[in-house]
Image (cartoon, grey):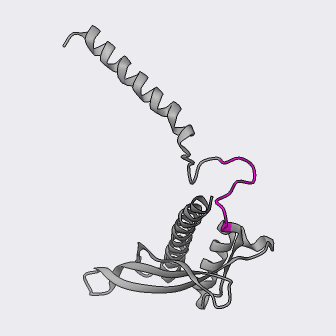
């Protein structure tokens, strides 16, 4: 194929792509994570109150969720988010003497979103799972402990991000359906 027809074909594809990009804003599409107009967070996220989650990692997950939801600001709550957190540990690597050298942690968060009616009604629920791993260096207990803490922190952050993303999608769909 010569370069002139190739150039014309590419030019036509560019025009078609530009046309599609110009139509997207008119179809009601709004990016979930892109910039939004001032004060236009996903509807209802700031109205989600996060319940207590047991143990240290549960407290860290609750703090991450509250920070992402904006629910610490003291606004009127319309929803109650209840989360159960569980960890699974799997040894993946072993040194020649049989001691573990690599650990994989799987974190699972089962969440339930209720409205605050009497009795509460289940609005949405789901399960989020994240996994990460770390190496256990020989004769370096502090390094292994630090690596475990960093892995657990990454898992909590990932779970919080995934839960908030699901909540935003569900609440956005509900707000769109109500219009």
Write the residue at 63% across / 73% down. Answer: 65
Against 135, is 91 above or below?
A: below
- Left or right? Give the position of 48 relative to 167: right
Q: Quadrant of the N terminus?
A: top left
Write the residue at 30% across / 18% down. Answer: 9
- Left or right? Give the position of 72 relative to 93: right
Magenta-drawn stretch contains 38: yes
Which is more toward the observer, 128 or 77? 77
Residue located farthest toward the right when viewing the structure as drawn? 74
Residue 98, x across and y down, in percent: 27, 87
Write the residue at 56% across / 68% down. Answer: 167
Report the magenta stretch's main SS.
Answer: loop
Q: How many marks?
A: 0
Q: Quadrant of the C terminus?
A: bottom right
The residues colored magenta run 36-45
Residue 112, x across and y down, in percent: 54, 82
Residue 177 quadrant: bottom right
- Left or right? Give the position of 143 relative to 69: left
- Left or right? Give the position of 90 relative to 65: left
Residue 139 quadrant: bottom left
Against 141, is 40 above or below?
A: above
Against 2, is 100 above or below?
A: below
Residue 163 quadrant: bottom right
């Amino acid at each position: 194929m010569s370069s002139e027809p190739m150039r014309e074909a590419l030019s036509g594809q560019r025009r078609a792509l530009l046309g599609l990009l110009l139509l997207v804003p008119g179809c009601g599409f709004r990016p979930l994570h892109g910039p939004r107009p001032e004060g236009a967070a996903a509807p209802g996220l700031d109205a989600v109150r996060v319940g207590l989650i047991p143990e240290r990692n549960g407290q860290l997950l609750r703090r991450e969720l509250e920070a992402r939801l904006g629910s610490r600001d003291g606004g009127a709550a319309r929803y109650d988010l209840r989360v159960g957190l569980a960890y699974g540990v799997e040894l993946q690597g072993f040194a020649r003497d049989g001691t573990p050298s690599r650990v994989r942690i799987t974190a699972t968060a089962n969440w339930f979103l209720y409205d605050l009616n009497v009795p509460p009604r289940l609005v949405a629920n789901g399960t989020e799972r994240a996994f990460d791993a770390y190496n256990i260096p020989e004769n370096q207990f502090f390094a292994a402990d630090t690596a475990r803490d960093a892995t657990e922190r990454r898992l909590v952050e990932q779970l919080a991000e995934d839960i908030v993303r699901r909540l935003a999608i569900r609440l956005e769909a509900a707000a769109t359906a109500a219009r």
